[in-house]
Image: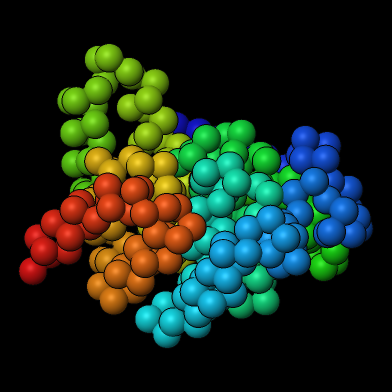
Amino acid sequence: MTTRPRLLPSAALLVATLALSGCTPGQDPAERPSARASATDLADVSPALAAYDSEVVEQLWQNEELSPRDRSLVTFALLTATGSTAGLPAVAERALDDGVTPEELSETVTHLGFYSGWQNARDAAGVLAAVYADRDVEADALPEQDPDLLPLDVAVDDARAAQVEQDFGAIAPGVAENTTEVLFRDLWLRTSLEPRDRSLVTVVALVGSAQVEQIPFHLNRAMDNGLTQPEVSEVMNHLAFFAGWPRVFSALPVVRDTITARG
């Protein structure tokens, strides 16, 4: 029997990474190294960008095809996945105001440690720790280290694991084993993110890092768990601004073909 890995508690991870981020609890957000440029600063440097920011991007946030909560979660996931920590404090604050819980933000960081790299997750955790300190978020509001897991569809996962083993077991046995035991039989079964949201932030990370080959599996999984086609369309519209048009256009053929294949 494989022993489940013991993950560093979210609260401890957040506190431990404060030194890495250069933030201290209670520090004025405007004084943090990660603070975003103010609207005045933006106008002083690039008046045209400031106009697009206030007239186009702010309108984007009002589009009803995607809820404010989901839009904030998507943006937070993208900035975490791409290591864009300068914008994270404002986005994390907005996400909390829009109904994303501290538990969900922390679990997103944990999840993206695997899908976007450990250092990106650690950097995001440091930023998030300062936001939590400002809001007096307590440890009991964060994900459990070792929660009860969602039930595993053994037949489906056995088939997935067998395919991974067949394709890559000989060349990278450690990757094959950890994919099954750590990711799909532990991380993906944690309950601090709904299955729909866990797949959604994974798709966002894949689009943001131009890893389009993995999109069909995770987009199908997201839609199987309740993400709708109109929501997918608006996620891509949102990401065009925050990830950039080239990355979105690289992903769109894969997204289109995945949705078409679903019938």
- In this rendering, the answer to whether 161 lies above or below 246 is above
Q: Residue at x 87, y 53 (%)?
A: 31
Q: Nearer the viewer, residue 219 or 149?
A: 219
Quadrant of the rendering where the N terminus is positioned = top left
Looking at the picture, how far across and down is residue 65, in whole percent? Answer: 38, 81
What colour scheme has been applied to the protein in the rendered image? rainbow
Residue 233 appears left or right of 23: left
Q: Is residue 29 left or right of residue 119?
A: right
Q: Residue at x 20, y 33 (%)?
A: 162
**Picture layout, residue 263 above or below residue 22:** below
Which residue is depicted at the point 42% across and 48% down? 208
Q: Where is residue 90? Give x, y as percent.
A: 70, 63
Tell me where residue 229 sits by quadrant: bottom left
- Count of numbered labels shown in the rendering: 0
Residue furthest top as drawn: 171
x 50%, y 53%: residue: 78
Q: Residue furthest bottom?
A: 64
Q: Please indicate whether residue 75 sits to the left or right of residue 87 in the image.
A: left
Closer to us: 151 or 228: 228
Above/below status of 251 relative to 98: above
- Nearer-the-camera pick, 125 or 46: 46
Q: Nearer the viewer, residue 213 or 142?
A: 213
The quarter of the rendered structure image containing the C terminus is bottom left
Q: Quadrant of residue 255?
A: bottom left
